[in-house]
Image (cartoon, rainbow, N blue to C red):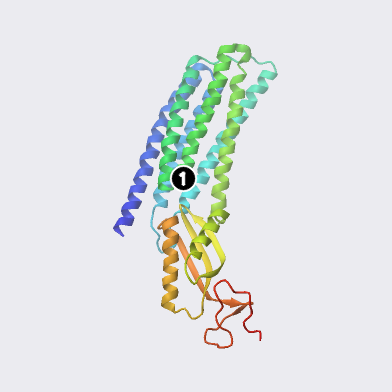
Amino acid sequence: MNTLFSKKSTREQRIYRVTIAGSLINMFLLIFKFTAGILGGSAAMIADAVHSLSDFMTDIVVLLFVKIGNKPQDEDHDYGHGKYETLATAVIGMALMGVGGMICFNGIAKTWSVINGEVLKSPGWIALVAAVVSLLLKEWAFQFTDRVGRAVQSQAVQANAWHHRSDALSSIGTALGIGGAILLGRDWAVLDPIAAIIVSFFILRAAYQLIKQATDELLEASLPQGVEREIIALASKESDVTDIHNLRTRRIGNSFAIEMHLRMPGETSLYEAHQHTRNIEQRLRSRYGEHTHIALHIEPLKVNGVYVDPSSDECPTPNRFDLQDDCRES
């Protein structure tokens, strides 16, 4: 039990450290981008600064929800609090969606004003410097955040890592737009808002993927078919186990929940059946983690839809893979 809590503590500490490190980067970039955007007269840079503000806010969401999600199960939450991390993923996705929509709208408005004859001011060099600095810092933040997210198997941290990556992508577009507007002159200043529009589509795509993932899990979507096939293969390794059916799977935060029915010969003793189920549970938990929720239902073998009675001499127990023959036919 102490080992279990120490692992949770270590996981929580790693999430806190990586999230706080990312939030410090976001705070610095937030101030730097807003200053550069205002002084350099760049709409794309100001939009990028708003994106950094959303990054900073989602860092706070991750810290709060991971704290709750790491609580152990209690009387009111038999399956723990893992879905709080899924909820954090949804919040991050919605924040990204809002930011992407706002950046797209502002970019379209600026481009439309140029089409109608308005002359945009070329952005200053400080905006270009801010875009390059943001690109380097946010890609670095993505790398170390994603690495920790995968190591501790935290969806919220991985979602936050992609929030960093989306900011890095937006900085690429911003740098190209600002650089083109500076080098080509005022007549090409429209490249700045066009870059913001292109960036917004990358952000909206990342937001959609995060929201879809979180929604699927909150609505109890099954695990991918490849994972379910692997679950069946692992359970089938146990001797005397046949006809695995009624497999139901779902994700609870960072853990899997697995329920299935399996058949064994009717003459198997209760003790032997228990040992078989323990072996299957250990095999599944060694593959998917100690916090995997497993529920196994044992049934006797069936022949043509009828359970085989081991005490009856009329119908001997069929072989493991010979379940189609009706032993009651004379």
Can residue 224 be seen from the camera position used here?
Answer: no
Three-letter amino acid code at disc 1?
A: Ala
Q: Quadrant of the N terminus?
A: bottom left
Label 1 belongs to which residue?
156
**Rendering coords of residue 329 (x, y %):** 66, 84
Identify the residue at horizontal 38%, vertical 32% (top origin).
Answer: 24
Report x, y in % for residue 302: 59, 77
SS at mark 1 in the image: helix
Quadrant of the image occupied by residue 170? top right
Task: Look at 55% across and 58% down and name the residue there.
Answer: 229
Q: Considering only vertical position in the picture, is 17 above or below 297?
A: above
Please tell me whether residue 230 is drawn above or below residue 131 in the rendered image.
below
Picture coordinates of residue 5, whole percent (x, y): 32, 55
Q: In the figure, is residue 83 to the left or right of 107?
A: left
The residue sitting at 33% across, 48% down in the picture is 10
- Position of 14 with respect to 227 (left or right) is left
The answer to which image quadrant residue 22 occupies is: top left
Is residue 158 visible in the rendered image? The answer is yes
Q: 226 or 219, which is in the foreground?
A: 226
For residue 123, above or below residue 144: above
Where residue 72 sits, quadrant-wise, is: bottom left
Question: Residue 330, position in %: x, y?
Answer: 66, 86
Front residue of 293/74: it is: 293
> At 48% from the left edge and 57% from the top edge, which residue is drawn?
256
Determine the residue located farthest toward the bottom in the rendered image. 313
Q: Is residue 161 left or right of residue 229?
A: left
